[in-house]
Image (cartoon, rainbow, N blue to C red):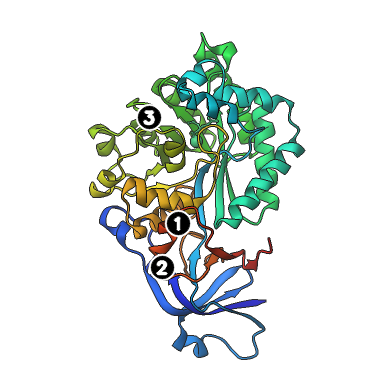
């Protein structure tokens, strides 16, 4: 079965030559083709180009379904490289507590926050978790996401962490989006280990990681390396154990302070270090020229009214930047990457082109899938979205909170929502 998208006003983020990611000034570069066609064969992008080349691109006897994309733009799906969308319940009470003046850290210290979710997690069945998470998957698919990384980390016991990871695996096997799974046993220190956090770290290392690896339940390992959570020393111990079991690090770092998380991530060749609200000279230096993708999470900074990551300085310093939603019940209860794109432009002063690279190519790299997703390229998986009538690429982030996505194609199939 073939699909032909024709008369596309502008085909966006076309790969001219394969690149792993774009950094610094290159981030302002996005290739597009005006008045374009694109052919999908089974689940892959087969061919594309300007409309005048369409005749040569396929034989007349190919069975084609044609979609007229006049006035419409076509983008590669967003790759959301950092989420926690398997969770046991919302936390709007804490939202109100924060309106009344409590901080995110204060709520966590009082046993709310992540620990609150971990308590709820104990009562949930895999089926309940799966059904709720699949509703969220549907929600993000509608807003243009075609790949998502999902973390555990609301279990905090071996049994509960494994339960979460099994749910993520189930989503991976059944959802049309591409899913990557991350083990985040070190997301918070459970109350019973409060006075002896290294005992909990021992549990993560000696019991959880071997079991996660033996059952092949995760692609990556994460640690919340920050003030009031896990120290650099604990983080390094956990990352070393994870690496020994084949899990590449992708860590939460520098959200709450200059805590050394970035340096620890780089030291262990993390695929990404995420949050980065606090960035000093040492962090910039540590990241430069490495294979670690600096990832910012504008939804969390917006929702918690936090200090913003210095994205302009990062790009000016020649670093790459990826952006993800951090969809979770505590610090970012939204997975809408269109809104993340708008925040990139409005709050972080990024150009629309920089935002496109941060949410497609660079975020695909940050979840280890840039060889098959993140750009429009021959042979890549046909995960795309078609917008409604739009004047140009600036329009999508400009129209913040608007729904401009008309058609979603995943694995070469039009999604009927
Ligand atoms: O990425 N920072 C740590 N973890 C999540 C928040 C999780 C929660 O509050 O439930 C984050 O923001
Ligand atoms: Fe997170």
- Kindly state the secondary structure of the residue where label 2 is placed: loop
- Quarter of the figure that contains the C terminus: bottom right
Precedes in sequence: disc 2 or disc 1 = 2
- Quarter of the figure that contains the N terminus: bottom right
For label 1, the crowd category at 10 Å Cα-Cα, with few meaning under 14, some 14 to 19 and many 20 or more, is many
C-alpha distance separating marks 2 and 1: 12 Å
Looking at this view, name the residue that lies furthest to the top.
195
**Which residue does the image show at 54% across and 27% down from the upper left?**
96
Q: Quadrant of residue 34?
A: bottom left
- Kindly state the secondary structure of the residue where label 1 is placed: loop
Count of all numbered marks drawn on residues in the image: 3
**Which residue does the image show at 55% across and 58% down from the upper left?**
144
**Circle 1 sits on which residue?**
360
Residue 298 point in image, percent of width and height: 42, 42
For label 2, the crowd category at 10 Å Cα-Cα, with few meaning under 14, some 14 to 19 and many 20 or more, is some
C-alpha distance separating marks 3 and 1: 25 Å
Nearer the observer: mark 2 or 1; the answer is 1
Residue 196 point in image, percent of width and height: 51, 10
**Circle 2 sits on which residue?**
15
- Left or right of residue 82, residue 417 in this image: right
Q: Which mark is residue 261?
A: 3
- Kindly state the secondary structure of the residue where label 3 is placed: helix
Report whether residue 287 is seen.
Answer: yes
Give the answer, above or below, for where 317 lies relative to 75: above
Give the answer, above or below, for where 285 lies relative to 138: above
**Which residue does the image show at 50% across and 16% down from the upper left?**
109
For label 3, the crowd category at 10 Å Cα-Cα, with few meaning under 14, some 14 to 19 and many 20 or more, is many
Precedes in sequence: disc 3 or disc 2 = 2
Residue 72 point in image, percent of width and height: 50, 73
């Amino acid at each position: 079965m073939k699909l032909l998208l024709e008369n596309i006003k502008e085909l966006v983020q076309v790969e001219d030559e394969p690149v792993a990611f774009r950094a610094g000034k290159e981030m302002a570069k996005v290739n597009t083709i005006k008045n374009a066609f694109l052919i999908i064969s089974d689940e892959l992008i087969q061919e594309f180009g300007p409309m005048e080349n369409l005749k040569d691109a396929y034989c007349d006897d190919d069975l084609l379904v044609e979609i007229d994309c006049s006035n419409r733009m076509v983008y590669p799906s967003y790759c959301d490289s950092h989420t926690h969308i398997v969770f046991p319940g919302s936390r709007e009470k804490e939202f109100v507590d924060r309106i009344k003046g409590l901080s995110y850290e204060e709520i966590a210290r009082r046993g709310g926050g992540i620990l609150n979710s971990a308590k709820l997690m104990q009562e949930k069945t895999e089926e309940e978790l799966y059904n709720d998470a699949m509703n969220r998957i549907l929600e993000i698919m509608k807003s243009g996401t075609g790949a998502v990384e999902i973390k555990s980390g609301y279990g905090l016991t071996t049994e509960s962490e494994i339960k979460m990871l099994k749910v993520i695996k189930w989503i991976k096997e059944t959802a049309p989006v591409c899913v990557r799974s991350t083990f985040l046993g070190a997301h918070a220190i459970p109350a019973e280990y409060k006075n002896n956090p290294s005992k909990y770290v021992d549990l993560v290392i000696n019991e959880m990681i071997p079991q996660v690896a033996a059952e092949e339940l995760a692609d990556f390992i994460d640690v919340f390396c920050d003030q009031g959570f896990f120290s650099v020393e604990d983080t390094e111990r956990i990352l070393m154990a994870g690496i020994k079991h084949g899990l590449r690090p992708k860590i939460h770092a520098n959200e709450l302070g200059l805590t050394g998380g970035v340096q620890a991530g780089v030291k262990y060749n993390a695929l990404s270090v995420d949050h980065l609200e606090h960035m000093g000279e040492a962090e910039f230096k540590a990241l430069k020229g490495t294979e670690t993708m600096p990832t910012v999470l504008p939804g969390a900074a917006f929702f918690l009214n936090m200090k913003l990551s210095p994205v302009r300085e990062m790009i000016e310093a020649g670093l790459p930047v990826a952006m993800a939603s951090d969809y979770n019940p505590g610090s970012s209860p939204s997975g809408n990457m269109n809104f993340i794109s708008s925040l990139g432009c409005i709050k972080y002063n990024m150009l629309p082109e920089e935002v496109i690279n941060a949410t497609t190519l660079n975020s695909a790299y940050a979840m280890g899938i840039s060889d098959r997703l993140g750009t429009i390229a021959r042979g890549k998986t046909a995960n795309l979205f078609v917008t409604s009538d739009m004047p140009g690429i600036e329009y999508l982030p400009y129209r913040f909170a608007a729904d401009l996505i008309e058609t979603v194609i995943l694995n070469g199939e039009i999604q009927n929502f």
